[in-house]
Amino acid sequence: MNLLKKFKHKTQGLSNHEIAQEIKRVLKARFIHRFRRVRYKLLGTEISDRKLKASLAPDYKNDDQLLVYFKQRQTPSIFWGVERAEETAKTISEFSVTFIDETLQIADEVCNHTFYFLGHTHIYQKLDWFYDCTNGYSWPKSHYSEIVLSNAKPGSDVKIPWELARLQHAVCLGQAYCLTANEKYSQEFCLQVRSFYEENPPEVGIHWLSPMEVALRAVNLSVGFYFFRASKSFDLATLKSMLKIVFSHAKFIEENLERSVRITSNHYLSDLVGLLFIGILFPEFKRAKKWREFALSEILKEMDKQVYSDGVDWEASIGYHALVLELFLYSFLLCKVNKIDIERRYWDKLAKMFLFVKAYIKPDNTAPLIGDWDDGRVFIWKNRHTTDHSYLLSIAAIIYEDERFKVTGFPAEESIWIFGQQGYETFENIGTEQQAERSAAFPEAG
């Protein structure tokens, strides 16, 4: 009876066709997880070199050719500032010495396996993707379908190893490498890539429980690849591990999209962004075109669906608004740098999302704690307090060359790593808003 009531509540207001779709989705999800568990126990999930080669469109003659190709290829492109990393590092060093000192300190701590996230410092004697160092609990290395979060040791939080495994510190390591040319940062990145693949084969462990986590990891790994691919330490073993991670992540996301007939959220959007990044940045995979086209089409639909016409995210949360804005932002910029057109009305709606940020930011550049709050960001270009959203306006000023978004006299470091020297010059040439609005209304958002 309880199950029937739950089903009626969940499907209330849906058409018969939509109810049928939801039933099909739920049944498929329950079946597929059990099927994968049996397949894992019988066949395993490791991606062999042979499987990797079969997933790639070009027919490379040997491994050396594979490594040379990925180190030297000219397209596709990543963000302007990362593409011209040496020039960007020089630009940063001319106006933000403090940033350099902070970045190198954090990167050195990462090399020593000391990480700061979720408001605490986490120290690992040995890099362990399953360990919660706040209470000494290690999550099981079982098939993801067998893991029950509520069975963990009291006080354990799966978000701690999840944060580590997002690999968002790859950006900091990449910045440190560009600023110093010190191979130790590249060596650490390569070590972590190989370690993650060896310790987290497809579908095994907690890092396959959430497609959103899989997607954010893939996005950061992709950018890390562009930071380090030309380094001496980026060898064939690292490349193969990285390609196997990227391929398995795209496949997993594609098969586990977090959507339902009734509702979608930042989780589904994150899934799509992960697929888009892989589809654009790794066109060598045979399914890349399908991933890219599907993801972009759905991302634009989600902007129509999840963002009100006044530019506010529907989840009624300042924290989630900033995360959703970043998800759209980086997707649009990646498309732009790779000459993939996005209809003007979507760029206009993105501008409205930035205007909402400008309206809610307080004089001290922090955001008010309204609604459910999440510290989530797509990339961490600079270590900021989680309520500091001011960097978003610097990015908007450069995109739109609009004085309304130029609220400081200098660009945020994030905008330089995204747009490079040209972005810095664009920001400098933008005038200052003569009379800022004292208030703004967003009626659809309430």
Image (cartoon, rainbow, N blue to C red):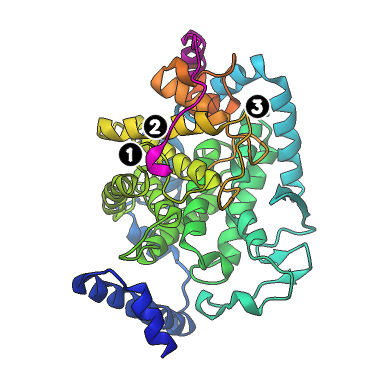
Closer to the camera: disc 3 or disc 2? Answer: 2
Q: Quadrant of the C terminus?
A: top left
Circle 3 sits on which residue? 179
Mark identifier at residue 352: 2
Q: Residue 319: name its quadrant.
A: top right
Q: Verify whether residue 304 appears in magenta.
A: no
Q: Residue 390: name its quadrant.
A: top right
CB-based contact (under 8 Å), mark 3 and mark 2: no
- Mark 3 or mark 2: whose residue is earlier in sequence: 3
Residue 14: x %, y % from top left? 26, 69
Q: Which amino acid type corresponds to the residue marked 2 in the rendered image? A: Lys
Q: Which amino acid type corresponds to the residue marked 3 in the rendered image? A: Leu
Please tell me which residue is depicted at 75% across the width and 40% down the height of the picture.
108
Q: What stretch of residues is rendered in magenta?
A: 422-446
CB-based contact (under 8 Å), mark 2 and mark 1: yes
Mark 3 is surrounded, within 10 Å at the Cα level, by few (under 14), some (14 to 19) or many (20 or more) other residues, namely: many
Mark 1 is surrounded, within 10 Å at the Cα level, by few (under 14), some (14 to 19) or many (20 or more) other residues, namely: some
Helix, strand or loop at label 3? It is helix
Please tell me which residue is depicted at 35% across the width and 50% down the height of the picture.
60
Circle 1 sits on which residue? 309
Please tell me which residue is depicted at 73% across the width and 39% down the height of the picture.
106
Q: Is residue 373 above or below residue 5?
A: above
